[in-house]
Image (tube, rainbow, N blue to C red):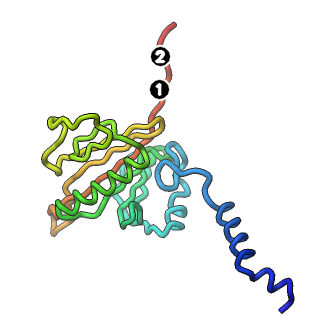
Amino acid sequence: MSARSRQLLRAPFVLAHLLAVIVISAPVGAADFRTLDFGARCDGVQAREQARGSVSIPWKKIPGSDVYAFRGRDFGRDLTLMYLCPKGALFSGNYLFPIEQLETAVTSYHNAYDLLVSIYGAPLYDNTQWQVGAKTKDPRNVNADPRKYMTYWKTSRLNVNMAMMRGYEPEGRGWRSRGWRVFLVLSGIKKFPDRRSD
């Protein structure tokens, strides 16, 4: 092996070049919902999700909208992901957590809540027992029933809504409740033109 070949295989040289490739290939900024910004075309979402290891699943058609659904990973776990794209552009993104027993679903909610607080800050509306950022915990604002938890964040670009919902699965010719699930919806803030008359 030549001296040049040995130099190329040295750990610092290889590590420096690997780091350069990672930095160059890393996304510049995070998307609003997984791989897309709100209002962006949904054409390539299948390929983008597959590149992340997600698997496409069938979903009920919604008139006037394209719907893309996947089984994938986020929040450190397997989830169902859904992109709602009226007129081909991303309008909302949904995370459906697995159906779980109530205690486990509350733990899932709390874990997702903590992560979302770290990203978006204190919620605008929050009726959970955790109420991060609340000056005082007014008991009238805390729902004692975790099945009715709701949390809402609003940023300059996004609405983020999280709630608990019953989890149903098909059984025979109908549906049966199997437990509870965390449901998280992200949507863009629609800018309306100023209609004031001067």
Instruction: Quote the CA–CA distance across marks 2 and 1.
Output: 8 Å
- Relative to 152, say whether 6 is above or below: below
> Who's the residue at 17% across and 68% down the image?
171
For image coordinates 34% across by 52% down, the residue present is 114
37 with respect to 181 (left or right): right
Dot 2, how many residues are within 10 Å of its Cα: few (below 14), some (14-19), or many (20+)? few
As helix, strand or loop, the secondary structure at mark 2 comes to loop
Q: Visible in this render: residue 146?
A: yes
Q: Amino acid at mark 2?
A: Arg
Where does the image place residue 60, in percent across and percent down from the top left? 33, 57
Which sits in the foreground, 70 or 75? 75
* Quadrant where the image shows the N terminus: bottom right
The image position of residue 32, as x and y in percent, is 49, 48
Residue 4's image quarter? Answer: bottom right
Q: Which mark is residue 195?
A: 2
* Residue 175 can be seen in this image: no
Residue 182 found in image quarter: bottom left
Query: As shown in the figure, which amino acid type bears the numbered disc 1?
Result: Phe
Disc 1 on helix, strand or loop?
loop
**Pointers 2 and 1 in contact (C-beta within 8 Å):** yes
Residue 25 on image: x %, y %: 65, 62
Residue 7 percent location from the top left of the image = 81, 81
Quarter location, residue 107: bottom left
Q: Residue at x 43, y 57 (%)?
A: 68
- Please name the residue that numbered disc 1 is placed on: 192
